[in-house]
Amino acid sequence: MSDKDTKEPIIGAGVLRIDGPDKLAGRANYAADNLPANMAYGYGVFSTIAKGKVTRLNIDEAKRMPGVIDIFHHGHFPSLYRTPSSFVQGNKVEETRLPFEDERVYYEGQFVALVVADSFENARAAARHVKVEYAAEAAVANLAQGLDDNGTQAGGGHSRGDAASAFDSADTTIDVTYHTPVETHNPMEMHASVAYWDAQGDLTIYDASQGVVVERNALSKIFAIAPERITVHAPYIGSGFGSKLWTWPHAIATAAVSRELGRPVQLVVPRQQMFTTTGHRPETRQRMRLATDGNGKLVSLRHEAINTTSFTDQYVETCGSVTKSLYSCPDLTVGHETTQVNRGTPTSMRAPGAAPGLFALESAIDEMAEAAGVDPVQFRLDNYAERDESQDLDFSSNHIVEATKQAAERFGWHDRNPEVGSMREGREIVGYGMAACNWEALKRPCDARVSLRADGTVFASCATQDIGTGTYTIVAQAVSDVTGVPLDRINVKLGDSSYPDGPISGGSWATATTLPAIAGAARNALDELKRYATGGNGIFAEASADDLSVADGALRYDGKQASFAEVLDAARYGSADGEAHTEAADSKYSYRSFGAHFVEVRWDPGISHLRVARVVSAIDVGKVINATTARNQVEGAVVMGIGMGLFEATEYDERSGRPVNNDYAEYVVPVHADQPEIDVILLDYPDLAFNEYGARGIGEIGITGLAAAIGNAVHHATGKRIRELPITLDKLMDDVPQAQSA
Amino acid sequence: MRHFDYARAESPQQAVAAHGSERDAAFLAGGTTLLDLVKLDVMQPQKVVDINGVDLDTIERLDDGRLRIGAMVTNTALARDERVVNDYAVLSQALLAGASTQLRNKATTGGNVMQRVRCPYFRDGVSACNKREPGSGCAAIDGVNRTVHAVLGTSDNCIATHPSDMCVAMAAIGATVEVQGPEGRREIDFADFHLLPGDTPAREHALEPGELITHVTLDAPLEGSRSAYLKLRDRQSYQFALASSAVIVRMDGNTIREARVAMGGVGTKPWRAPEVEAALKGKVASEAVFAEAAKRAFENAVAYSQNGYKIPLGQQAIVRNLTDLIAA
Ligand SMILES: Cc1cc2nc3c(=O)[nH]c(=O)nc-3n(C[C@H](O)[C@H](O)[C@H](O)COP(=O)(O)OP(=O)(O)OC[C@H]3O[C@@H](n4cnc5c(N)ncnc54)[C@H](O)[C@@H]3O)c2cc1C
Ligand code: SF4
């Protein structure tokens, strides 16, 4: 990769996050930390019905309250344009309806007015005095009602062979349905926007965004100005888990009212509305029909998923995305449908499609193995696909067999007595379960710039983001790898749409997309530097560029060495710059990441207590760029998977459509005390067909399959198959008294 | 901004005088309930009397063996107090099972006694809720009621649990609440302090407007007793009880001479269970005896749409706690 000395390779090293000290010291500015002079504050008025119309909005009292500058609503809001919301054009938003576009209410917690005042407190107080009258209509509360009332819309799929006939003539079959609830991302940092327009009519917006370039492009469509006149800043994001991938109504509204008022405006979405107007993982119902022949080989597989979507947009949760290719099966159908309900528009949440999809698939595989009388690990080993049968392509690199075997070994799977409830320790019944995990590997087009500077530092920039995962750090590692400059002299800038176009931080594709562009830019910068070194005033004027080598931030020639700074100084240049553009991945192979989770649960029936006691995960994501941040991603995803398995569900009141557990106290995610021993094995086989680093990205795979592994372990311990997440203790108790009425 | 008057009191007298008997005034202790609900616009005090400067943060042993706890003693300080750890283990454990370290460092004894319900319909500011807006109805009865709603002591007007862990331990121990008000000082038996919702769920406690809790005085520890708190919930920390039990027992060999049992998470107030105590008294300890006794607590329990599981879970909280305590 570089012609530097090979000491301890920087790629793969467990380097600590280079942005850590800034975060610790409070120097890292998040969106709402920006306080431009003369800034006003917005606060929303949110609908309290799930469906209907705003018939009257009485703002008289609110308008007279202290500090109120203006109150916006349908009828008093600048007219905007819609964005085509195209993924390909890079101007996608998830909720395409513009704020205050009409008087209709599509979901509880929708913006119906926006108060702007001179302080946050004044805006909030006034917002509470805006009186809204509605003509409420009967709302669609949930998936079941959506199906009854409105049926479904098609959402794509995949089919090969004839799954129905194969099923009908098979030896052993199962037909089971799984259900997953709405989950809410709940990043720590609230969605927040700070927008202002300068005298030329150019927009600057600080936004909690996982995609500054796409946001810039979408806003360019919405405000009908050239993208070059918009700058989106998101240098730090207090995580997003997908909820900050696309621009939501609050950001559009903030920019719009800032222009209208001619001053900066800040809007922070309250925690309660983070459950309504910034996306969620939708509710799913998944019917799984599987069949095996007499040898335990899968002969038919059908995965039919329905998810809820909003009345304004169709969001498809692609639950069957993995089912198409994980197992070898000639007769297979994957189908996606949506049904409209009165909730906000759903969006991607960590491992969209695969997280709920693998709960269903990997639970069903366990049920199938049981029906076929085969050990669940063996069943998987017997049925894993050797090539991607859905695309008729080879996998670029697939070590799922090794991952499964290694994790089984480390976990001690051979100690498992398959009989339900047979393993006990004290009062606890021990359950062992496992599941495969899987995620697509994507690489998008990317631009990057690297400057070698006369002061001895290196500047690298790309308009991607670090959402807390370590992107700053791995970019610096790539620069250091190519140039030999130590990390403390590398200055990485991300999260600014004026830098060269980079990818959204989603889909686990930031690493594979960004690093090759950064490395390319660094090499181009070195080439430029070599030209300076060998040019007129050059320090090695006698040499030709090809004779120079690079090591430790210096050029070498003929036993002599000159640091980058000395080279630049001699040539009297401030910097040597390089840019690079890299393309999306080709389609020669099917690029995917693989792995397996093994989970031990403990069920104490005397106090109805279920806990996850131990997790072993073996993950094959290609080359690991940073052992520390990579492990951290898997551990974090495992913990999130425990939340998905045991706790998480956004509970709606069916009458009002309001999420009722809409804060951190009541929306239960794991706390430290719930975290078991987590043993992560990173296989670290470079996938060089995918990119020069051989890295496939690691943010999402860890959550896939985890809930299924828990459910399978719960079944082993208790004999109960809980097909509806989360697996709360009440679902495992016997003889639960029911309400008398109802 | 919503404006309110703010006063800092340096003595109970000043606090009571500054508060007056207005219903829309509030004492500010740790603020972990009050500020939360003010920000949500659910509580709207016109006057806030800050009692953090009031000298009520000591714990003293009285001559009769009782323990007198100042209202401003924090939950952390109380849980770590040696006398509490030694003589009232159940109280220390209950406190430490509550909330989080940060919250416990702020939360006070008086404030904890006075904390409001966690019912989401109470907190959302718009739903029908008889506590927040008397006469408007109770959205929880036919709504989401799995976690913070009760099966004991409910009425057609309100089914919210009293959320405190500390109070469950105090209910088992027995205590007196000392208050000072515009009319002078008086004492209220802890058992009478919290009120059942009945027809007036907005009335939650026995304080008259303007009365300040100055102390909670625990009954003398039961000689030769052991005690423990067990809290059951979905996640292992930082969640209100789905069901909990505070038990104190005095044994004579294998025979239970005396037992005190109270429950949290299942009742609309900190729930003392005398019928369980009676069923345990004089019996030879065994899981079967505990189970039989625990059942009695729930004879009149009412299951709502999502919380019927609390009936068996509450019994498990008692049985396991007794089993471990007596085996210890
Ligand atoms: C996220 C979260 C989780 C929690 N989890 C738990 C839990 O698991 N278990 C648990 O038991 N508790 C829990 N709590 C509640 C916590 O224990 C209470 O908020 C706290 O004890 C209240 O004490 P404070 O001093 O902060 O009261 P404040 O908020 O200051 O006051 C509360 C109320 O009491 C009144 N008041 C205060 N002091 C006096 C006094 N001396 N005399 C008369 N009136 C007074 C105030 O006017 C106010 O109405 C949790 C709270 C939060 C926010
Ligand atoms: S349970 Fe009580 S607090 Fe909750 S809505 Fe009903 S009346 Fe209000």
Image (spheres, rainbow, N blue to C red):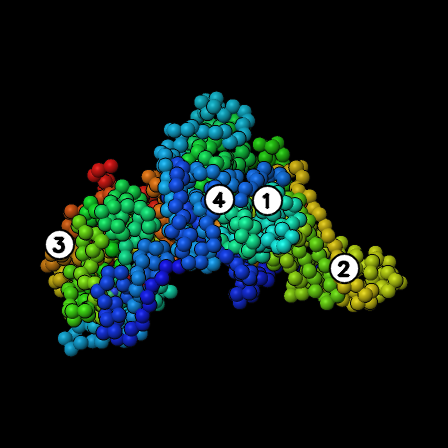
Mark 1 in CB contact with mark 3 (< 8 angstroms): no
Q: Chain of mark 1?
A: A
Indicate the amino acid at tag 3. Answer: Glu
Name the quadrant where ligand 1 sits: bottom left
- In the structure shown, which secondary structural element does the residue marked by tag 4 occupy? loop
Residue A493 appears left or right of B48: right
The residue sitting at 61% across, 31% down in the picture is A392
Mark 1, Cα crowd under 10 Å, few <14 / some 14-19 / many 20+, is many
Indicate the amino acid at tag 4. Answer: His
Q: Nearer the viewer, residue A41 or A359?
A: A41
Give how far across and how far down residue B85 sits, in percent.
26, 70
Q: Nearer the viewer, residue B288 or A579?
A: A579
- Labels 4, 1: one chain: yes
Q: Nearer the viewer, residue B27 or A262?
A: A262
- In the structure shown, which secondary structural element does the residue marked by tag 1 occupy? helix
Please give the residue where the numbered disc 4 appears in the rendered image.
Answer: A76
Give how far across and how far down residue A676 sits, in percent.
42, 55
Q: Nearer the viewer, mark 4 or mark 2?
A: 4
Please give the residue where the numbered disc 1 appears in the rendered image.
Answer: A223
Q: Is residue A174 above or below residue B276?
A: above
Please give the residue where the numbered disc 3 appears in the rendered image.
Answer: B275
For marks 4 and 2 on the same chain, the one whose residue lies earlier in the sequence: 4
Indicate the amino acid at tag 2. Answer: Ala
Give how far across and how far down residue A481 sits, in percent.
69, 58
User: In the rendered image, is residue A645 in sight?
Assistant: no
For marks 2 and 1 on the same chain, the one whose residue lies earlier in the sequence: 1
The residue sitting at 44% across, 26% down in the picture is A171
Q: Chain of mark 2?
A: A
